[in-house]
Amino acid sequence: MVEDTNMTDAVDTAEPVSTEKKEEIELPPLEAAARRLERLLGGGLSDKDKMLDFYTNPVKVVRRWLGTSSGAADQATAEDVKACAAKVLDPSGPCAGGYKLLVSAQQTQNEGSFLSMSSCREVESWLLSLAVRILWKQGSFSEALDLSNKAVDIMVSHMEENSFHASTAPASSLFPLVARMYRLRALVAESINDANTSTMLRQDMAHAYNMATLRRDVDTQATLLNCMLRDLLKNSQVEQAEKLLSNSTFPETASNNQLCRYLYYSGRIQAMRLEYTSSYSNLSQSLRKAPTNTGTGFRIAAQRLLIVVQLLMGEIPERHVFFTTGMKQEMGPYLSITQAVRCGDLAVFTKVISEQSARLQRDGTYTLISRLAHQVVKAGLRKLHMSYSRLSLQDVADRLGLPSAKSAEYVVAKAVRDGVLDATIHHEEGYVQSHDLVDVYATKEPTEAFHRRIAYCLTTHNDAVKGMRYPPDAYKKQLEASRGNRRKRGEEKTDEELEDELDDEL
Amino acid sequence: MSVVASNVSAPAPSATGWMALLQEDDLALQTAAVSQLLTHVNTLWHQIAECLPDLESMAENTELPMELRQAAAAVASRVFFHLQEPQQALRLALEAGPQHFDPLEQHSPYVQRLVAAALDSFLKVKQDESVSVPKDQLQGMVYRLMDASCQAGHFQHALGIALEAQEVEKLKEILASQDTAFLEYAWKTCVENVTAKSFRQQALQVVADCLEKKPRTEAAYDLVVVYQLLNQPKAVAQTLVELLGSDDKLLGLQLCFDLMDTGDQAFVEAVAAEIPQEGFDQARKILVDGFPGEMALSFLHKHSHADPLIMENLKKALEERSSGSRSSVLHHAAVMTHSYLYTGTTNDSFLRKHLDWMKKASNWAKFSATASLGVVHSGHITEAMHLLQPYLPEEGQGEVSTAGGFAEGGSLYALGLIHAQPGTSAAKRHESLQYIRGHLRTSHANEVQSHGAALGVGLTAMGSADLVICKELKELLDTDSAVSGEAAGISLGLVLVGTGAGNPNSKLSEEFSELVAELKNYARETQHEKIIRGIAMGLALINFGQEENADACIEEMRSDRDPIMRYGAQYALAMAYCGTGSNKAVRILLHTAVSDVSDDVRMAAVLGLSFVLYKTPGRVPELVKLLLESFNPHVRYASCMAVGIAMAGTGNPESIALLEPMLDDMTDYVRQGALMGTAMIYMQCSDSKKTRAFREKLFSIVGEKHQSTMTKMGAIMSIGIIDTGGRNCALKLGSRLGFNKMTSAVGLCLWLQHWHWFPMMHFWSLALTPTYTIGLNSNFQYPKKFSIVCKSKPSAFAYPKKMEEKKEEKKKRVETVTLSTTAKEKARLARKRVKLGIYGEEMDVDAPKEEEIKEDDAKEEVVENKAEAERKVPQPSEFRVSNPSRITASQSLVCQYDLEQRYQPVRPTATPMGVIILKDTSTQEDDELETLRSPADEPEGETVPPETFVWTPPQPK
């Protein structure tokens, strides 16, 4: 599926990697990244800006590091990974498992350059995930799955050895990496598309999700929830997916990318379940939160689903959404569908659908679009209604391409009931009589519209406020300034005090 | 939908079918459905969540067979577990019975989570909170858990549960079969983790009962400590007597010294009273005859590293016209600084040298100056009367004049200060007490003298809870004189310190409760704020260590309309919960610190934090960090002091960094607090760039023209604080064994009152603890052959260098007129010398100092010329500390006993600090033994070299 383009990596390449010192550029990029992590995690206190590290927790450090090192990760080849692993992992240390998997045994290593205990597990996990991704991209799925299974086992054992009790916090710096590995494995398994693997994986994911929740491992929890939803959706288990959705809570502090995915999946599920309004809000929020310059695949998927949902709601999407850079090609069929719906021309609509059916099925929107036929009729009806105050049902049938006057009557009746039309059907005479236009401004409609818009603005504002970050202790400067020039005041005081002191003579 | 379904890999399992079967009437179908659901609940819980009501009603349906009901409950319980509702899950799991939920199966996260939930709810049940689970089931389960832990050998686990759940019976069961090591662990856990005092006492009693059954030698140490915690002097004495009579006499002596270390005179005397008069001379010598006091005094005197130049320079700086030489406040502060510098060293040569300077003090300053002798000589009981003779009021004079009496009052106060030092002879103390009491009775007419006498009585009778003395003090209070009334209030507190008089659970007689009630009434009626403050502080002292027993009293004081009473309430809270780290106390203090309308109350609340949290000092800077930025200067002042008190003697760089900006605060007394706080943190720290810079800053503030008096006073006092007691004293609120050091806490609490009343500054001597480490053999001699290994560079814990006499030279130089040409020539030569790398003597002197400069300075050091580095002699990585010497708290962490040497400590596991009784492993005569000598026998100051003489070889016969 296109929507799963790797958002994280793509986004983070935009971040500057230039924080490196010059001397480290000589190192291979992977190793340089590994050494940097070691400094961040272990040597954090001796660093210059130690106060900064003092305040951040390891999860955040690793997350940020993953972002900055994705450039190195993107270009890495299998050979690079192997070389790096041979260099930094100690075959007799805690990472022996990872070393064995990544490096063939005969390679010699120079001692002393291995990573310290503080970061070797993280780097091991990172290298393993890189190896899995490379295999996956090469198309050697079964090897990738095998490796990822072993990698997950290694990581889980790392986490368990650090915690006697499931609910106590283990090495939390592993969380983002474990999450990443679970996602990769799910993707690999999806590519393999094998019944046994999927069943096994499903159980494993359920267990891992449970453990992550108990460990308060937000990254893994969010990632696995998304993976499980994706798996269920792929198998068309919409009902089950909905149950999972309603019975679980998505962690608030999860990363933005996971939140985007989650919103997309929930939007999709709700669209299937005819809950268009909530689906619409979820999807538009997901699009809004998605990265703007990368992750095109995801945005396309979300956008076309959003268009369909909007159409189902009886709204016509803005024209510019079809012409966003990079999406024009993909949006073509949807543009024609939208046009058909807008015109209310059932014939054009059916034509477009039959032409594009394969494409729509691939996009996973076919089911929803087939629901649209009704909307087309409605739109046509509305148009007719605006033009004629009185129209025979036979004419309606002709105009809309309906088989008979009888069916036209049903359609009109439904439209009246839905509030699309304000009209009366005269059955004996066989015509529809529209009522006079009422003043919309006398109804509650404008208030509601305003309310919708204001609510939207408020949520956006609140989200923006929540999204803001302040550097620690930034307020102190202001405080100092407000307290400042105490010298001046001090001088003023001392004169008085000197007088006092003179009075206070011994 | 059907199109998408075409590429389905594996049909995702669904529980819908089984869930539908639940609705069937057929029992077999239902059973099958439930059992299927049970196997798949871990993956399909989100679906099964839909039929939770059905499952629950099935579990409760009595018509169904038991197995089915239990299985349904098990399914529902697991669903709740996945839904993150452990309480519900637990309720159903208990219904499901043991075959579905076995609390002992430790590896499943489900069970672990539910067990945690069960313990949580059990604790809630214990505290009479309502929970959704029936109590008896819960209790059964928790008991089973404890039994299982015991069977599996996880006794710590079981102990933890029993203590948390406050189960005395279970505790007995668990501890009955344990060895001494575990019992030691048990009492330590009780002390650290049990918050309710009443239950802690019960638990400790259980531990003590178990220890009683152990062989005496093995359990004696723990037994004594536990009985001490239980405040049972009789039992302590019994154990000690048994021990002293056996082969383990040395251990007994060690325990006697440790007992002294807590500074609770009244308790020690009660123990001594139970020890038979004959045959236990050595123990009596320690407990009541003042041997520890003499030893401390002798150490402080002999090993004093007080720098005489500090005082000289300070005096000189104050005498300069610009620096406010005429301010009596600064003069007074300087006199106090002198006494801080020489606390307990008995070295008053500076005063004797500059009697004229001293005599500048008049009125209350005179009182204070006289009393400061008591600080310098604190613990010097043998000479006390002799020293103070010139100042003491004349005997048998009859009526006391109403005016004057400052020296007389001060000397009585000094007498009290000298005898209040812990470890001094009880007999001597009682003698002085009687003497001061005599003056107390006769001096009512003169409030200065009665002020001194009242404080003296309070100090000498500290903790004795003597009703007659209380009555006498109350009489003084009833004269309704502000000055003497305040002293009487405080002294009543001192006499009753830590007794909890007037509290519902107090062991004292009814009369004391009446007395306390009268005091409270009096505070409400009197017009004098000073008296109210005295009574409030007295009440605070009475509640020392009372914890929840004091709650009623504290609450009453806290809700008083008078801010001074509320002020006292904060101190009462600090004293009652001293060292407990109680969350409740911290919460109240923090709340008051930001919400009370009175500045003084807020200040007291912040200061209280440092008392409550002294055992976890790192928490104080953390908590106070935001208060340091408060807009209320009183709160900022108190925060500075609180950080200083908590981190005293650590040199902690983070705390220093916190206080650094406060040194330039816009309010003068905040700067004062910051200076004193920083000085406390730097106490006993070795020389480094930072400490040197701070010391210089202190002197420069004194000389600065534009500093306000308050700041200067802070700087002057800081000079005394940083080098207090000849650099051999520390500010510690806890004893070596983890008891609260009552004298220190009381001393510090009253010292802080100098904010309102300067003569309270003298209580500093009470707050200090000498940091000596002395190894003693069985005859109380110091073997010179004993030493302790310190695994660090010698400079890391060295005394700071003494100042050099430079200033005089400079002055002379100014007088000689130099021509501009010669000056240039000189400069040129100097530059040349620098180029050549000749630095002269000064650089060599500096070299060892630079070594220990910490990491941040490391780079600069590298930059410094490399030729210098070659000349440096690398310091050894460990060295030996001779006997006796100073070992500071932070140094003790890197110190170890050398168990290879001839003399070995009786308790090798204890930290090498304080008095260490040594076992002699050899039977040979040791000629390198030293005995204790009193300061009077030692030569004054540095040993004077003998006069030159001509040596004539003895004539051969």
Image (spheres, coloured by chain):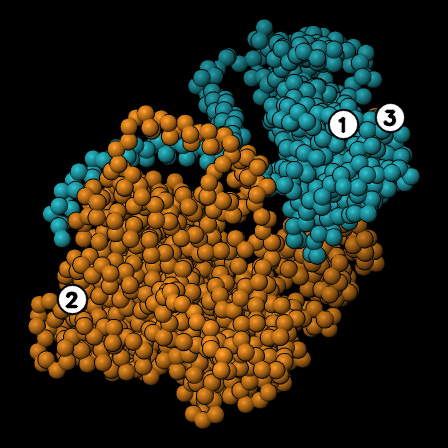
Chain colours: A cyan, B orange
- Specify few, some or many for label 1: CA neighbours under 10 Å numbering under 14, 14-19, or 20 or more: some
Q: Is residue B529 above or below residue B659?
A: below
Under mark 3, the amino acid is Gln
Confirm or deny contact between disc 1 and disc 2 (CB under 8 A).
Answer: no
Give left or right: position of A105 versus B250: right
The numbered mark, 1 or 3, whose residue comes first in the sequence reads 1
Total residue callouts = 3
Of marks 3 and 2, the one in the foreground: 2
Residue B162 percent across, percent down from the top left: 60, 71
Return the residue at label 1.
Answer: A28
Residue B336 percent across, percent down from the top left: 27, 58
Return the residue nearer the eye: B672 or B285.
Answer: B285
Residue B565 percent across, percent down from the top left: 26, 61
Residue B726 percent across, percent down from the top left: 38, 61
Confirm or deny contact between disc 1 and disc 3 (CB under 8 A).
Answer: no
Instruction: Measure how far apart labels 3 and 2 are at the Cα level.
Output: 96 Å
Q: Is residue B798 above or below residue A23?
A: below
Instruction: Measure how far apart labels 1 and 2 are at the Cα level.
Output: 81 Å
Residue at the bottom extreme? B278
Q: Residue B406 — which label?
A: 2
Under mark 1, the amino acid is Pro
Of marks 1 and 3, the one in the foreground: 1
Whether residue B276 appears in this view of the structure is yes
Instruction: Tell which subunit mark 3 falls on.
Output: A
Of marks 1 and 2, the one in the foreground: 2
Give left or right: position of A448 versus B704: right
Confirm or deny contact between disc 3 and disc 2 (CB under 8 A).
Answer: no
Residue at screen point 47% across, 38% down: B839
- Specify few, some or many for label 2: CA neighbours under 10 Å numbering under 14, 14-19, or 20 or more: many
Q: Residue A138 — which label?
A: 3
Q: Is residue A487 above or below residue B430?
A: above
